Image (cartoon, rainbow, N blue to C red):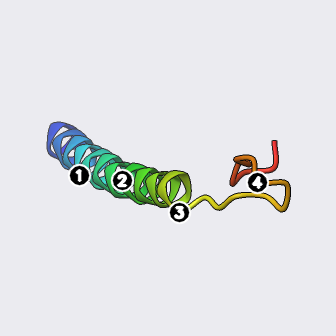
Amino acid sequence: MIPVLLVLLLALLLFGAGFAVKLLWWVAIAVLVVWLLGFVMRGTSATGGRRRWYRW
């Protein structure tokens, strides 16, 4: 009985890890898209020079 429970627990952990990794890939892609959009769509400042779209 204990080996069966250990196998089920291992399967549950691997499923959860796989889901978390896939979710992290989607989050990384979304952040990359937002960064690229901000990089492409940055405007010019009032003095005519280029300014950064981020504040840091």
Given residues 29 and 8, the one toward you in this image is 29
Residue that label 4 marks: 48
Tell me the number on the disc at residue 31: none
- Real-space Cα separation, disc 1 to disc 2, in angstroms: 21 Å
Query: Which of pointers 3 and 4 indicates the residue nearer the eye?
Result: 4
**Can you name the residue that lies furthest to the front here?**
48
Tell me the number on the disc at residue 15: 1
- Real-space Cα separation, disc 2 to disc 3, in angstroms: 18 Å
- Identity of the amino acid at label 4? Gly
Query: Which of pointers 1 and 2 indicates the residue nearer the eye?
Result: 2
- Identity of the amino acid at label 3? Met
The number of callouts visible is: 4
- Real-space Cα separation, disc 4 to disc 1, in angstroms: 53 Å
Q: Is residue 10 left or right of residue 36?
A: left
- Rendered position, 41 above or below 4: below
Q: Residue at x 70, y 47 (%)?
A: 50
